[in-house]
Amino acid sequence: MEHGVKRKDFRNFSDKIVIADASPLIDLKKVEKLNYLKMLFSEVYTMETVKRECKFKLPDWIKVEEPQETTKKCLRKKGWMTVKNRR
């Protein structure tokens, strides 16, 4: 770990995170700090569309999976996710 920082120092963070936008990944890659996600979370997920938008090879520890349909419905119902049709 960098600068003596250990994963146990971040107890308030979740074990898992889903990155639904490429910007954080792109920005962390630019400043060579993509590994911070690995330090903070035991599992990091993103989607294929985000992976393509990054235009660089994601590390193997970032898992690329599509959310299940039931999860999408739940997120939409709570207002945490909107779906826009591309035309």
Image: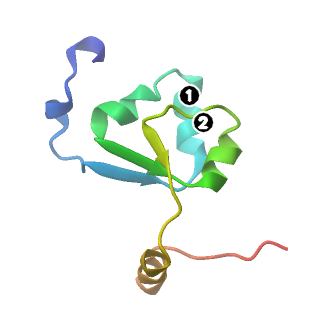
Q: Is residue 48 left or right of residue 45?
A: right
Between the C-alphas of marks 1 and 2, the distance is 5 Å
Furthest-bottom residue in this view: 77
| Residue identified by numbered label 2 | 26
Mark 1: amino acid = Lys
Note whether 2 is above or below 27 in the view shown.
above
Spot occupied by residue 78 in the image (x, y as percentages of width and height) = 40, 83
Q: Secondary structure at mark 1?
A: helix
Q: State the mark number for residue 29.
A: 1
Q: Is residue 76 left or right of residue 50?
A: left
Q: Is residue 19 left or right of residue 3?
A: right
Query: Who's the residue at 79% across and 72% down the image?
Result: 86
Q: Quadrant of the C terminus?
A: bottom right
Asked where in the image residue 11 lies, by quadrant, the reply is top left
Q: Nearer the viewer, residue 59 or 17?
A: 59
Query: Who's the residue at 37% across and 51% down the image?
Result: 17
Q: How is the image coloured?
A: rainbow
Spot occupied by residue 48 in the image (x, y as percentages of width and height) = 62, 53
Mark 2: amino acid = Ile
Q: Are marks 1 and 2 in contact (CB under 8 Å)?
A: yes
Q: Nearer the viewer, residue 22 or 67?
A: 67
Query: Who's the residue at 71% across and 36% down the image?
Result: 55
Q: Quadrant of the N terminus?
A: top left
